[in-house]
Amino acid sequence: MSNKTFTMVKPHAVADNNIGGIIQMIETAGFRIVAMKKVLLTSENAGKFYEVHKERPFYAELCETMSAGPIIPMILEKENAVADFRALIGSTDPADAAEGTIRKKYAKSKGENAVHGSDSDENAQIESSFFFSGIEQF
């Protein structure tokens, strides 16, 4: 059974022209891109997206970082999508990320870690719906 996950290429990775390389790694790993676009989040929209982290000490910095430039949100499809994608992106801290992962190759730091990846099927659906209307999800 195929299922879906959500990702986004973060502002610093977009600014560094890493979109194509990241997409290539995603497709090579067997994911199909179901939906994709380029958007610029306001700090307020970033805050809504990351509301789950509102009480965390890094929340304000996260909102600032995520609204610093355009992002590329995507819905990906593959069997075991959430777990397989989290394995592909690697640890949040690129110093701890395994060789061959997106974050090992493209992340600058724990805060600028190149991509977001949903941590559950439920959050993948919530996060996908934040960026894509029903007509954009197929």
Image: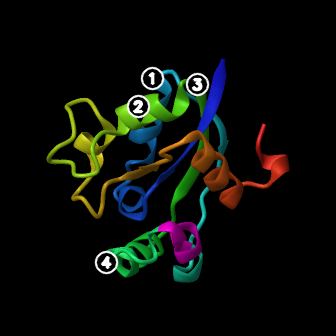
Left or right of 128? Residue 57 is: left
Categorize mark 3 by other alpha carbons within 10 Å: few (<14), some (14-19), many (20+): some
Look at mark 3 in the image and give the residue it sits on.
78
Check if mark 1's residue and mark 3's residue have beta carbons within 8 Å: no
Closer to viewer: mark 1 or mark 4? 4
Q: Secondary structure at mark 4?
A: loop
Q: Main secondary structure of the magenta part?
A: helix
Residue at image x 76%, y 43%? Answer: 137
User: Does 128 appear above or below 44?
Assistant: above
- Label whose residue precedes the other's in the sequence (4 or 2): 2
Left or right of 10? Residue 111 is: left
Residue 61 percent coordinates (x, y): 34, 78
- Label whose residue precedes the other's in the sequence (3 or 4): 4
* Circle on res. 57: 4
- Between the residue at mark 3 and the residue at mark 4, the CA separation in whole angstroms equals 34 Å
Give the residue type at disc 2.
Met
Q: Is residue 48 magenta?
A: yes
Q: Secondary structure at mark 2?
A: helix
Q: In this orientation, which residue lies closer to the viewer: 66 or 79?
A: 79
Q: Quadrant of residue 121?
A: top right
Q: Is residue 122 magenta?
A: no
Check if mark 2's residue and mark 1's residue have beta carbons within 8 Å: yes
- Between the residue at mark 2 and the residue at mark 3, the CA separation in whole angstroms equals 14 Å
Look at mark 2 in the image and give the residue it sits on.
25
- Between the residue at mark 4 and the residue at mark 2, the CA separation in whole angstroms equals 32 Å
Q: Secondary structure at mark 3?
A: strand
Give the residue type at disc 3.
Lys
Closer to viewer: mark 2 or mark 3? 3
- Label whose residue precedes the other's in the sequence (1 or 4): 1
User: Does 43 appear above or below 118?
Assistant: below
Magenta residues (range): 46-52
